[in-house]
Amino acid sequence: MDPSLYPRMAEVEDQHWWFAGRRAIVRTLLSQLALPPEARILEAGCGTGGNLPMLARFGVVSGFESDAVALEFARRRGCAEVRSGRLPEAIPFEPAEFDVAVMTDVLEHLERERESLMAIRSCLKPGGWLLITVPALPSLWSVHDETHHHLRRYLLGTLRDLVEQAGYEVNYISYFNTILLPMVAGVRAARRLAGKSNTDGHDLSMPSEAINKILRTIFSAERYIVGRVSLPIGVSLIVLARKGGMLDGMRGGVRFVP
C-alpha cells in the first residue's frame, strides 16, 4: 500500500462499512472454532491495527507489520504485541507458537505468496488454523488495486490450490461481499468507462453516516451465511484452512464447529 494512505486508513477503519463488515464476518468465522483458553493468535500484516481489538476477544494477540507508519498506529491500539516483520523471510516469532493465524487482505501484496503461506504454517501449532481474506475476481481490477499495491485478485479455485500447495487442508472457502457485488462492479465499470477513479484514487472515502450505516448493515449480514455455505461469487474470498500433515492435530486444542 502507498504509505501515504496509512493515516487515512487508521482514521476510518473503525467505522467504515468495508472494514466493519469484514471484521464482522471474520469474527463470526473465528467464533466457530473451539479455541483453547488463552488461545495464541497471530495477525500477519496487521496494518494499522483495526482487527486487533476484535481478535483480542479470542485470546492473546500478536502481530507484525513491515511498514513503520502502520506499525506505530497498530501499537497505539494497546491490545497486542506488535513487532516489525516481513513475509516470508522475517517473521519475528518462534515456530509452532500460535493456534490461529489471520491474514486479511495481505496475500495479494506478496510476490512470494506460496512461500509466505508456508512461513506462516511454520508458526502454527499442530492442528492450528489459518484464516485468509483476499480481493476476488480479476475483472474487478481498478485503480484502487493499483494504489493499494495489489499484485493480483483471486479466483476461488486458484486460491484453494495455492493454500493446499502450501501444506494446508482447506476446511472452508467462499466468496463474500456478494450482496454488494453489483454495486461495486457497476461503480468500477463506470469509472473505467469515464477514464477516471474517485478523487483520491482509492476506496477509503467515508460516505455519509446514513449511507455508511446501510452499507455496513448489508455487508455485515453475510456473517449469517459465511461458514455455513459457500457463496458462488463476490468481491472478496475467505478461507479457513488447517495446518496439514498432522494426523494428531486435535492435540492443538482446536476443532471446527460446523
Image (tube, rainbow, N blue to C red):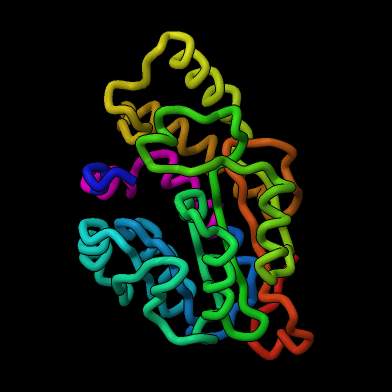
Of 157 and 89, nearer the camera is 89
Of 138 and 215, nearer the camera is 138
Q: Which residues are magenta?
A: 7-27
Tell which residue pokes out farthest to the right in this image.
247
- The quarter of the picture where residue 140 lies is top right
Identified at 28% across, 27% down, the residue is: 200
- The quarter of the picture where residue 28 lies is bottom right
Q: Is 32 located above or below residue 179 in the figure? A: below
Q: Is 223 located above or below residue 35 in the figure? A: above
Whether residue 158 sits left or right of residue 25 in the image: it is right
Identified at 26% across, 57% down, the residue is: 70
Q: Is 109 located above or below residue 83 in the figure? A: above
Identified at 72% across, 76% down, the residue is: 244
Q: Residue 201 location, x and y as percent?
A: 32, 28
Q: Residue 133 location, x and y as percent?
A: 55, 52
Q: Main secondary structure of the magenta part?
A: helix
Of 180 and 72, nearer the camera is 72
Identified at 59% across, 62% down, the residue is: 114
Whether residue 61 sits left or right of residue 29 in the image: it is left
Q: Residue 126 location, x and y as percent?
A: 65, 85
Residue 25 lies in the magenta stretch: yes
Quadrant occupied by the C terminus: bottom right
